[in-house]
Amino acid sequence: MKETAQILREKGLKVTPQRIAVYTMLRNSMEHPNAEMIYKALEPTNPTMSLATVYKTLDYFKHLGLVQELNVGEPSSRYDAIVACHPHTVCSVCGKVQDLEMDELTELHKKLKQELDFEVEQEQLILYGTCARCRKKA
Amino acid sequence: MKETAQILREKGLKVTPQRIAVYTMLRNSMEHPNAEMIYKALEPTNPTMSLATVYKTLDYFKHLGLVQELNVGEPSSRYDAIVACHPHTVCSVCGKVQDLEMDELTELHKKLKQELDFEVEQEQLILYGTCARCRKKA
DNA sequence: CCCCTTTTGATAATAACTATTCTTACTTAA
DNA sequence: TTAAGTAAGAATAGTTATTATCAAAAGGGG
């Protein structure tokens, strides 16, 4: 995996320990954390970092296309370091947000973009339901 | 169109002027309003209605499947009286939220649901971009 | 038409995020 | 190498959307 500092530099961002910490954490995480979760996760290693910095950092990253923001119906936004368009599932039992591989869908979307009188820049497909694990438990 | 009061009764809700007002407004609106917009729209005809009532009413409606809540990346939720699953477009210039007719997509989704190890209850597809009107202006 | 339960309106409280302000840290230029 | 200027961070105050609380009013079955 490409070095985090290198990526930040290429985006024209000043490289700071806080930014490295947030971006590295997001790249290594599968849980699509929100700002609070990122803050808590980094607290042990970066005890002086402020929650406001997490918010500002995520906002920079979002505008530079380093992360995407997800609205999954919770009060707080979640973040994903995989910026390519891909669908997500949200389990209404355990709350887990997961990535979904779905090339078919991506292909269809591309075709539809051309047919629509609407120029698509970004899209979000979210499936709400019950994940395999929670279904087995029930 | 079926009478609003009748629909509320069938859902087991007490029929109140406030609920009739909110649901009728939503059924006649194409703009996918948020709570504040509904409140403002109803102010002239229902001057004593409280914003809290709008929020509570929308919450009831949502749980009973009378409306669906949309998260389009704005701080406040929007609401749609068309509860059947359908995609939405969000124009990043004028902010307009519109319904999208897209049977192809709905069909594909049905097929995909069966292949997934995830039981889909609800889904949201949101396309962000620039609408036809705003594109012409530019 | 009355009583019981729900709903409403007013407003306080909360949660998530944003703005502000002061301090610290790079970075360039003499 | 250092002084100056700009950018970033920490702490915290402020804002906004939403939820909770509670007394008063209103629906609706009997």
Image (cartoon, coloured by chain):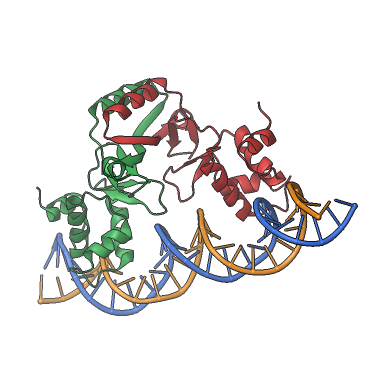
Chain colours: A red, B green, C orange, D blue
Is the C terminus of chain B in the top left, top right, bottom left or bottom right quadrant?
Answer: top left
Question: Could you tell me which residue is drawn at 18 percent across and 59 percent down?
Answer: B20
The percent coordinates of residue B8 (x first, y second) are 18, 53
Res B24 quadrant in image: bottom left
Question: Could you tell me which residue is drawn at 61 percent across and 49 percent down?
Answer: A54
The percent coordinates of residue C1 (x first, y second) are 10, 76
Comparing B69 with C23, the one in front is C23
User: Is residue D3 placed above or below B82 in the rendered structure?
Assistant: below
Question: Could you tell me which residue is drawn at 27 percent across and 28 percent down?
Answer: A115
Res A81 quadrant in image: top right
User: Is residue D5 placed above or below A31 in the rendered structure?
Assistant: below
Q: Residue B113: in sight, yes or no?
A: no
Comparing A86 with B112, the one in front is A86
The percent coordinates of residue C9 (x first, y second) are 29, 73
Res B129 quadrant in image: top left
Lateral position of residue B61 relative to residue D21, left or right? left
Comparing B89 with D11, the one in front is B89
The percent coordinates of residue A100 (x first, y second) are 46, 27
Lateral position of residue C26 relative to residue A136, left or right? right
Question: Could you tell me which residue is drawn at 48 percent across and 39 percent down?
Answer: A94
Lateral position of residue B89 relative to residue A22, left or right? left
Q: Residue A17: in sight, yes or no?
A: yes
The tally of labels here is: 0
